[in-house]
Image (cartoon, grey):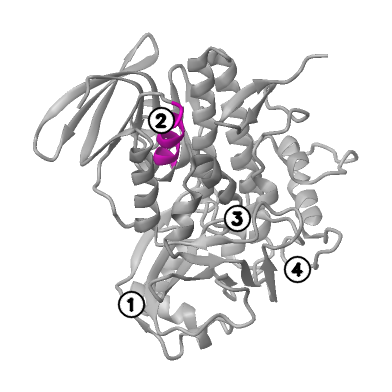
């Protein structure tokens, strides 16, 4: 282990691997410390088409294409009493497909790619403490599985350690938990399942339940079907007391969804169930002097629209652009941090509002679950709702910035069909529209925009 590095990355998931790979491709010295040994299990198997341009920038597209993951060409929804399918081949989409991945394999590909790009990747190494000098992180104390310990100093730090948040949660402690999306997920893997009916090839299935929660169904290339239940904690605990076990709650939910239950008629659950609580949180600051928080270390949303991996790689791309520009002397650190804070937080807030709007058309309109997934007034206090709304919907000059009615306006606008789209769900407003990379000089963020060629860098907009 070297004792000094230009950039230290904590965590080898999609956020850390992407940032490390992008920086190493530009000749920047990067050390990545990962607590586990890859491949390791992780949930979050359904990826968005907006991820493919990021794989292109990273130079990993060919590797991922060749691995054999299921190609995801769309989604099937049974939601709010309606059924509709969504294809990714519509004009203006970033790609006509994405992937359904086994995360242990996908994440391992990205970590190996970062290593091949020149990043010094160390697995089985845990960061125990971050030392600060004058408000800036300067060194990390680490230990490995053999009992060795050491200290590494650095110029910049990227915290990509996920929800554990080595820097974000343990040292900075500025996470704010939203009232919304305090949910529980329980899932397992099925064999001999039938294909989803009337669904695009390789599609994810997303199905609301009559009262409390929803189900996902994701086909994987090992011939299993990932099937998960998501519901609020109060309803989950009540059902568990009533039915006696998590397994009973899970299996009963499957029988309540008429679109999914026939798919599993002749199938069997080949694994035990995994359970995890999903909390929606956001850090007050996504970056600071000498550091950037990427992926789940900065914020966590909700599994509904499969945004986790994209937010991780999206934020990692922005981080790499900021650091490469700072180290090249093109942009000073303060301006780069302002760009990152605005760009990443805007992306998170747009998706937070979108997911909340989607939950409002849930089946059980009078149920506790539907109410529990709605942004509370406390949730809204620190959100730039009007600005986020304008980033989602155009033609809203007559919209008044009322904190009490803005979400109602947003829900109405999102469910009104766009030209050429059906009047189902969010009526053509997909997550691809919510996560545009800030690459347009005419729409800068904090006076800067992202230039992806030949490597991610920040550029000043031309001044008149």
Q: Is residue 178 visible?
A: no
Along the line of sight, which residue is nearer the eye, 216 or 25? Answer: 25
Please, what secondary structure does the residue beneath circle 4 have? Answer: loop
Please, what secondary structure does the residue beneath circle 3 have? Answer: helix
Q: Nearer the viewer, mark 2 or mark 4?
A: 2
Residue 166 in the image, given as x and y percentages of width and height:
33, 33
Quarter holding residue 106: bottom left
The dot on residue 244 is 1
Residue 437 in the image, given as x and y percentages of width and height:
64, 39
Query: Which tag, 1 or 2, sits closer to the chain's start?
Result: 2
The dot on residue 424 is 4
Span highlighted in magenta in the image = 15-26
Quarter holding residue 85: bottom right
Please, what secondary structure does the residue beneath circle 2 have? Answer: helix
The dot on residue 136 is none
Q: CA distance from mark 2 to mark 4?
A: 44 Å
Position of the N terminus, as image quadrant, is: top left
Q: Residue at x 62, y 67 (%)?
A: 74
Callout 2 touching callout 4 (CB < 8 Å): no
Query: Which tag, 2 or 4, sits closer to the chain's start?
Result: 2
Per the image, is 17 magenta? yes
Q: Nearer the viewer, mark 1 or mark 2?
A: 2
Q: Nearer the viewer, mark 2 or mark 3?
A: 2
| Crowdedness near tag 4: few (<14), some (14–19) or many (≥20) residues, C-alpha within 10 Å | some
The dot on residue 49 is 3
Q: Is residue 297 above or below residue 333?
A: below
């Amino acid at each position: 282990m070297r004792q000094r590095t230009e950039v230290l990355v904590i965590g080898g998931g999609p956020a850390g691997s992407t940032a490390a790979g992008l920086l190493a491709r530009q000749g920047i010295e990067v050390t990545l410390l990962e607590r586990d040994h890859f491949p390791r299990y992780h949930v979050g198997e359904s990826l968005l088409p907006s991820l493919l341009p990021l794989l292109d920038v990273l130079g990993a597209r060919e590797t991922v294409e060749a691995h054999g993951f299921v190609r995801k060409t769309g989604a099937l929804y049974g939601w709010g009493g309606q059924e509709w399918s969504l294809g990714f081949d519509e004009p203006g989409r970033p790609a006509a497909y994405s992937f359904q991945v086994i995360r242990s394999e996908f994440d391992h590909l990205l970590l190996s790619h970062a290593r091949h790009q020149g990043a010094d990747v160390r697995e089985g190494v845990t960061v125990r403490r971050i030392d600060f000098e004058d408000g800036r992180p300067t060194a990390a104390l680490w230990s490995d599985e053999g009992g060795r310990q050491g200290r590494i100093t650095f110029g910049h730090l990227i915290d990509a350690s996920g929800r554990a948040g080595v820097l974000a949660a343990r040292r900075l402690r500025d996470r704010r938990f939203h009232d919304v999306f305090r949910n529980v997920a329980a899932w397992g893997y099925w064999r001999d399942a039938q294909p989803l009916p009337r669904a695009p090839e390789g599609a994810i299935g997303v199905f609301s339940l009559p009262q409390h929660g929803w189900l996902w169904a994701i086909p994987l290339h090992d011939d299993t079907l990932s099937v998960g239940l998501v519901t609020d904690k109060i309803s989950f605990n009540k059902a568990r007391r009533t039915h006696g076990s998590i397994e009973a709650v899970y299996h009963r939910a499957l029988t309540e969804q008429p679109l999914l239950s026939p798919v599993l008629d002749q199938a069997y659950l080949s694994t035990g169930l995994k359970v995890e609580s999903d909390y929606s949180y956001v850090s007050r600051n996504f970056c600071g002097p000498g550091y950037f928080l990427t992926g789940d270390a900065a914020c966590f949303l909700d599994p509904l629209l499969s945004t986790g991996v994209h937010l991780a790689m999206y934020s990692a791309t922005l981080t790499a652009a900021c650091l490469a520009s700072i180290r090249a002397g093109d942009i000073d650190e303060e301006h780069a941090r302002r760009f990152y804070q605005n760009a990443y937080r805007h992306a998170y807030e747009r998706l937070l509002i979108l997911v909340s709007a989607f939950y409002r058309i849930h089946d059980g309109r009078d149920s506790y679950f539907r109410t529990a997934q709605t942004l509370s007034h406390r949730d809204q206090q620190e959100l730039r709702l009007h600005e986020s709304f304008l980033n989602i919907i155009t033609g809203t000059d007559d919209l008044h910035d009322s904190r009490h009615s803005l979400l109602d306006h947003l829900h109405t606008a999102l469910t009104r069909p766009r030209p050429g789209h059906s009047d189902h769900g969010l009526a053509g407003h997909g997550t691809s529209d919510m996560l545009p990379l800030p690459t347009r000089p005419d729409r800068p963020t904090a006076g800067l925009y992202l230039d992806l060629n030949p490597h991610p860098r920040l550029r000043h907009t031309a001044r008149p």
